[in-house]
Amino acid sequence: MDPEFWHARWQENRIGFHLQETNSRLVRFWPPPPAAPGDRVLVPLCGKSLDMLWLLDQGYRVIGVEISRIATEALFAENSLVPAIDQAGEFIRYRCDALDILCGDFFALARDTAGDIDAVYDRASLIALPPAMRAAYAKHLASLLEPGTPCLLITLDYDQRQMSGPPFAVTDAEITRLYADTFEIGQLCSEDVLDDNGRFREAGITRLHECTFRLQRK
């Protein structure tokens, strides 16, 4: 899956993955210890997620990474935020108070461009990637983090034969394969959410679990 796929999704406004409210698992399980207000939270593949505004409201600083300029500019415009715009390495950086959005390819993000990262929130990054890209994503994420950095990871698990994705199904076993070498892993919950997701039922999905994990960089 190349960047043009996501550029096309935003250009055509095919963004069913975008939630119109804050994710309930974020509200329920944030912060993953030892994260605390004032910390800087990385949100990879962030789109225009309202979860970032919720984190800001809780007193966190946020750095999002998003490949689509349409999504990035919509985040600021739709929330009446006026960013300063400059260049940061290979990225166009949008800054407004405690919010930074780096517009560009997450896989090109260097540690000196990212700056300090105290915690990570991933609701829609891993499940946006096809299987062939996930190991590289997990490895690159780990390379940006200091030991002890906590992450809150939210995934979906369903029968991939019933829908091609994205969002893709990610099993608990795959989480172990992807992260066990570089992170401590703890599952916080796994809940059946099919009744709350009509578009998945319409696609023929018969089982849909949303799974929440706490990871900590070794």
Image (cartoon, grey):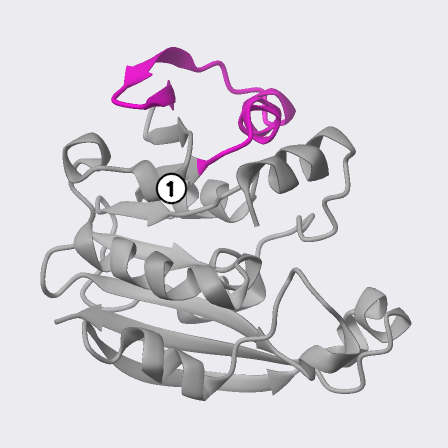
Give percent across and percent down for residue 175: 39, 79
Query: Is residue 96 something one can see in this rendering?
Result: no
Image quarter of residue 191: bottom right
The 10 Å Cα crowd at callout 1, few under 14, some 14 to 19, many 20 or more, is some
Horizontal side of 152 relative to 24 (left or right) equals left
Q: Which residues are magenta?
A: 66-95
Q: Is residue 195 left or right of residue 116?
A: right
Residue 125: give x, y in percent of width and height. 48, 56
Q: Is residue 197 magenta?
A: no
At 55% from the left and 31% from the top, the residue drawn is 68
Q: Quadrant of the C terminus?
A: bottom left
Left of 162 or right of it: where is 147?
Answer: left
Location of residue 138 with respect to 93 vertically, above or below: below
Q: Identify the image quadrant of residue 50.
A: top right
Which residue does the numbered mark 1 point to in the structure image? 106
Give the residue displayed 77% in from the left and 42% down from the top.
14
Is the residue 59 above or below the residue 173 in the image? above
Q: How many marks?
A: 1
Q: Determine the residue positioned at 90% across, 70% down.
A: 202
Q: Is residue 208 above or below residue 163?
A: below
Place of residue 13 in the rendered image (x, y in percent of width and height, measured from the top left): 77, 35
Residue at 58% across / 54% down in the picture? 22
Q: Is residue 137 above or below residue 208?
A: above
The type of residue carrying mark 1 is Phe
Q: Is residue 83 visible?
A: yes
Residue 152 position within the rendered picture, expressed as x and y whole percent measured from the top left: 37, 66
Give the residue furthest to the right.
Answer: 202
Residue 61: image quadrant is top left
Q: Secondary structure at mark 1?
A: helix
Whether the magenta-drawn stretch holds residue 92 is answered as yes
